[in-house]
Amino acid sequence: MSNSSILVIDDEVQIRKLLEITLSSNNFNVTEAIDGKSGLLTAANHPPDLIILDLGLPDIDGQNVLKNLREWYLNPIIVLSVRNSELDIITALDNGANDYLVKPFRTGELLARIRTALRLSQSFTTSAVFEFENIKIDFANHLVKKNDEIVKLTTTEFSLLGLLVKNEGRVLTHSFILKEIWGVSYVEQTQYLRVFIAQLRKKIEDNPNQPKFIKTESRIGYRFIS
Amino acid sequence: MSNSSILVIDDEVQIRKLLEITLSSNNFNVTEAIDGKSGLLTAANHPPDLIILDLGLPDIDGQNVLKNLREWYLNPIIVLSVRNSELDIITALDNGANDYLVKPFRTGELLARIRTALRLSQSFTTSAVFEFENIKIDFANHLVKKNDEIVKLTTTEFSLLGLLVKNEGRVLTHSFILKEIWGVSYVEQTQYLRVFIAQLRKKIEDNPNQPKFIKTESRIGYRFIS
DNA sequence: TTTTATCTTTATAAAATCTTTACATCTTTA
DNA sequence: TAAAGATGTAAAGATTTTATAAAGATAAAA
């Protein structure tokens, strides 16, 4: 059936070999990365349908790789680790892991948990690329295109757009947006928000003064619609 | 925060007691069932946000309870079982369980796995939408549609409509509405109310001068009917 | 250092919303 | 039915909120 793609991020050769054999004989397309840095890079360049992540990587701590991935990666992440402490498990799950398996693991169980994770995530968008009419937002590569031309956004503008897009259809209050993008101490600075919304509109809307995507909800906040 | 409801289906008194204490002290509303039959019944009558299911039930085999639930129940089901065989785990996951924990379990880990399951299921849970003939009111997203077209309401108009709808069928007095929407010091400003009711009717009624939804109760107040 | 990009602040015009007024119409009750 | 009271509605005035340009501040890069 499947042909889903899976990225394995693990530094142990034996584990990678075992997973490669197990997974590809079950019709998954497997790619591999041997440390956190290359894992993040591979994930960004070719976002897989699922990531299997080891916590004990040589360069970056696995929990940080996980957090980093979760800033934009929406598909399932299954953590595979020798660490069996309750704290590690809770931290990983709360950092956004979908499941946590302790090594040594049973391959049949791993496969069942992969199936479960994929089944549950099916209703999500499969890629980290959002597309609305003439604009394209690629979260993995931090790239926005309008009519296939790259739109240059600052970090803040990009996060703001990301927050709006990820909550498409929903009204986000001024204070919520300010808290998420600038931090708790900025919840009163609504003028910031106005300035940045205006900049964003100027860059992505065809008619900034009659916005199609970023709608104002007077006295409440803003809403992205498609 | 949460207040999600959890149904525990388990025949062991000690486990039920332990779960009840753990879960309710973490702000979950816990209900319990001691066998498969009553579990299925309770789930049907008051569908909880999540079910914790033991596989070793006295009447029906847990796997069958699981299959039965999955015919209609979409929220997360976490299986909790003494059975640690790979076959049991794979079967349960493939029967639609979201997760499988082996007893004895660590309560912190269980809580983290509950949070994860709820988090994952939330993304495709649709918010409560009130629907009356051709109008739709989505409170979570602050959205009102008439004949599938977005109706632009101001904050005050939206709160007023919300108050009326949430008390559908009931007469709300002028002073009650004024107190709820504008505050105690406005209870005498019935003219406000008239103006806003007129605006609301103009926006959501087919015939504002012969309102179908927002009815006037002369000398008392207003009533929303469907 | 100078340049450049970005963030922060200020000022002001424009738009949206709220409040008040005036008067027409409807309801209740004697 | 007529008078008194209550309600509906349009529109003007007042206030708040939002949009936008642009100047000043800051930090990173050449």
Image: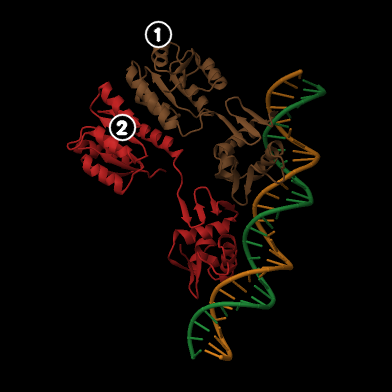
Chain colours: A brown, B red, C green, D orange
Image coords of residue A140 (percent x, y): 57, 25
Number of the front mark, 1 or 2: 1
Quarter of the figure with the C terminus of chain A: top right
Q: Residue at x 32, y 34 (%)?
A: B78
Q: To which residue does mark 1 refer? A: A14
Q: Nearer the viewer, residue A192 or A122?
A: A122
Question: Taking the image as drawn, is residue A183 in sight?
Answer: no
SS for callout 1: helix
Q: Residue at x 25, y 23 (%)?
A: B84
For the residues marked 1 and 2, what is the alpha-carbon distance in whole angstroms? 33 Å
Quarter of the figure with the N terminus of chain A: top left
- Whether residue B159 is situated above or below residue A201 in the rendered picture: below
The residue type indicated by label 1 comes to: Gln
Q: Chain of mark 1?
A: A
The residue type indicated by label 2 comes to: Thr
Image coords of residue B73 (percent x, y): 34, 41
Q: Residue at x 51, y 56 (%)?
A: B134
Q: To which residue does mark 2 refer? A: B107
